[in-house]
């Protein structure tokens, strides 16, 4: 994932609302949101190159999602970051034990942000900061830096989510994720990838011939534990490829 905005509101009638875009090269093979045959408790997309995922849900209210940390100078990683989400969703390890394990393994992966939680708690771990943080109720955003790093796309999407919290619906949340407007040049971060790439990556929804938003995913969790997930898939230039809706 390259952009996740989410509202964590334990005790509310809708304790967790997530709107997220996965940005990736179009040539990287993947499957859309669905139930995993070998782990039927998991509902998530699937990276067919490495076997992991970027966002999904599991048994007992388990939720996990991931963004990469953008750093063109980082060394190649030994393992795919997507396995961090897959292992949590398919397993039964308590959150604190799982995060302890992730801290010990985090140098095996390129930089990442990880969200893991259940119906009672939600945690964030940044591999550069190497400290897991229990999140207080609130509205948050993650892109390719730290939690709530004020990049223009994050600020725009987070504000858009806040405006929809009185009546969140998949259609309006997906519209929020479909904003192709790049940020003004004077507001761009400098992450070492050059002005043209910074501009391309600065929009909430990214479209180009080779790289862009592959999936927009919305998750709405109800107080009774039921979950509503909708995902739209995209190809080159942002062409719409399909939609999946799950009620769990």
Image (cartoon, grey):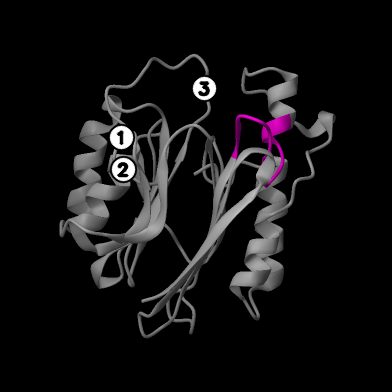
Eyeballing the image, is 45 above or below 138? Answer: above
What is the x, y in percent for residue 212? 61, 38
Magenta-highlighted stretch: main secondary structure?
Answer: loop
The reply to whether the magenta stretch includes residue 43 is no
Q: Can residue 48 be seen in this view?
A: yes
Instruction: Tell me the mark number nearer the camera, choosing from 2 and 3.
Output: 2
- Residue 65 visible in rendering: no
Classify mark 2: helix, strand or loop.
loop
- The residue identified by callout 2 is 52
The quadrant in which the C terminus is found is: bottom left
What are the residue bounds of the magenta stretch?
200-212
Q: In this view, does 219 lie above or below 12?
A: above
Residue occupied by mark 1: 50
Residue designated by label 3: 71
Name the side, left or right, on which 223 lies relative to 101. right
Mark 1 residue element: loop
Quadrant of residue 134 in the image?
bottom left
Q: Residue at x 30, y 70 (%)?
A: 61
Spot occupied by residue 246 in the image (x, y as percentages of width and height): 42, 72
Dot 3: within a 10 Å radius of its alpha carbon, few (fewer than 14), some, or many (20 or more) residues?
Answer: some
């Amino acid at each position: 994932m390259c952009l996740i905005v989410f509202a964590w509101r334990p005790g509310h009638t809708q304790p967790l609302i997530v709107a997220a875009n996965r940005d990736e090269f179009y040539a990287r093979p993947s499957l859309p949101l669905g139930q995993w045959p070998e782990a039927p408790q998991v509902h998530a997309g699937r990276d067919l190159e490495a076997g992991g995922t970027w966002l999904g849900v599991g048994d007992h209210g388990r939720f996990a999602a991931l963004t990469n940390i953008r750093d063109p100078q980082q060394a190649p990683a030994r393992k795919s970051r997507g396995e961090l989400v897959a292992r949590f969703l398919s397993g039964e390890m308590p959150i604190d034990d799982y995060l302890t394990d992730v801290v010990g393994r985090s140098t095996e992966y390129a930089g990442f942000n990880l969200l893991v939680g259940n119906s009672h708690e939600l945690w964030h771990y940044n591999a550069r900061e190497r400290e897991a943080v229990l999140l207080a109720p609130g509205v948050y955003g993650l892109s390719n830096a730290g939690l709530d790093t004020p990049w223009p796309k994050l600020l725009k999407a987070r504000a858009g989510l806040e405006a929809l919290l009185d009546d969140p619906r998949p259609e309006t949340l997906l519209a929020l994720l479909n904003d192709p407007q790049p940020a003004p040049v004077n507001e761009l971060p400098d992450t070492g990838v050059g002005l043209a790439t910074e501009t391309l990556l600065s929009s909430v929804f990214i479209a180009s011939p080779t790289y862009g938003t592959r999936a927009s995913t919305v998750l709405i969790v109800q107080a009774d534990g039921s979950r509503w997930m909708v995902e739209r898939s995209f190809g080159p230039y942002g062409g719409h490829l399909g939609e999946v809706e799950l009620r769990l």
